[in-house]
Each structure stands twice: as structure tokens, then as C-alpha cells.
Amino acid sequence: MKPSRSKLSSTVLCVLLQLCSLQLLVVAMPTCRLLEDVVLNTHHLLRDLGGAFPVQCLKYNINISFPDSAFPASTANHPQCRQALWVVYETLRETQLLFEDFELPVGEGGVSWDRKKLSSFQNLQDRLLEEGSCLSTNKTPDVLSPYFSNVTAVVQQQGSAACGWMALRRDVLWVLKTALREHHSCFTRRGRH
């Protein structure tokens, strides 16, 4: 028995509509990427804020150590890119929360960071957090919570606050550098989306 022309036409039409719907769904899905040059500028501003990690703060390295396992293997597939970008986003978000919740110690025993560069860093940080807000929905086991709890504990103590901020700066630099070096293909370059 041969299918009728109208049944065949409606079947073809149905398949075409499903394909078009699928394509629209894929096109409409937001790409969750961060601009590579903004991340690089953020890294440079943070790097240039102040001096090297102080020797007197080395004793806090035992309690404050960024988890290497936060980053996925260095491949450019979508799940690994999303995870790598999430690590950058979440690190910047948690860092912003620390800046909001705690005063940066200045003067003797505090940090001697360039205020203008710090302000520029925070502006770029805000921009990256806004651009990467789609990453906040990433359902990834939060491997970063223990790290930020440890940083917060050190920042809260008056005698060690400066060391906590310096450790945070060191580790955020590491996160940005690692992401740019090992997951560079996950970032958007201007003119490439």
C-alpha cells in the first residue's frame, strides 16, 4: 500500500518543522563565554596591584590553598569549557563578596595596593561577573567553598587579614593565568563569537 501524497507531505513538513525548531533552539541558546582580553586585563591589574607574596604570610599557605582539581582537563569541548569558565566566574564572584564583606587592611601591617588599580580591577571584575552571569547556573559540585571559607577565616582575624588578602590575590592570579593558558580556546576574542 502506497502512502497518500497528503500523508507524505505532512510527514515531511513535520520533520522539517522539528529540524527548524531544533536549529532555533541551538541558535537561541546563549553562549556562555567571557572576553579573553577583559580576563587578561583583569589579571594584569591584579598582578600590578602591589608587591610579591610576603614571606611572613607563608605560614598561612597550609590553610589557604586553591584546589587544583577545580579546573577540568585541558580540552576544548563544551563541558570542560563551561567548567573552566565557571571556575573563573565563581572565583571572581567569591572575591567580590569578600571585598563587600571585609575592609581591606591598609597602613602598617596591611596591604599596600595601588588604589587606582584596585578600583580598575573591581570594575573589570564587575563586568566579567555581569557577562558571565549565565555561568552562575552551572550545577557543579562546589569544590571552591572550602577554599573561600579558609580565606574568609584568615581575612577575619586582625593579625592575619593582610596575609589572607595577599593569598587571595595570589590565588586569583593563578586562576586567571591557568584559565587563559590552559583553556584559552574557551574564551571569546573580540570579533569572534
Image (cartoon, helix red, strand yellow):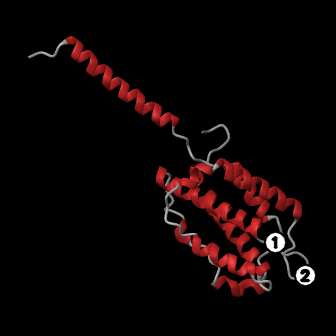
- In the rendered image, residue 165, in percent from the top left (x then y), is placed at 76, 74
* Disc 2, SS: loop
**Mark 2 vs mark 1: which is more N-terminal?**
1
Q: Nearer the viewer, mark 2 or mark 1?
A: 1
- Position of 4 with respect to 9 (left or right) is left
What is the three-letter code of the residue carrying label 2? Glu
- In the rendered image, residue 38, in percent from the top left (x then y), is placed at 72, 50
Residue at figure coordinates x 81%, y 72% from the top left? 103
Res 120 → quadrant: bottom right
Residue at figure coordinates x 60%, y 53% from the top left? 184
- Position of 1 with respect to 152 (left or right) is left
Residue at figure coordinates x 81%, y 64% from the top left? 48
**Residue that label 2 marks:** 108
**Residue that label 1 marks:** 103
* Residue 77 visible within the image: no
Q: Could you tell me how far apart the alpha carbons at marks 2 and 1 are, in whole angstroms?
A: 15 Å
What is the three-letter code of the residue carrying label 1? Glu
Quadrant of the drawing holding the C terminus: top right
112 vs 100: above or below: below
Quadrant of the drawing holding the N terminus: top left
- In the rendered image, residue 138, in percent from the top left (x then y), is placed at 52, 55
* Disc 1, SS: loop
Between residue 44 and residue 3, name the one nearer to us. 3
- In the rendered image, residue 78, in percent from the top left (x then y), is placed at 48, 50
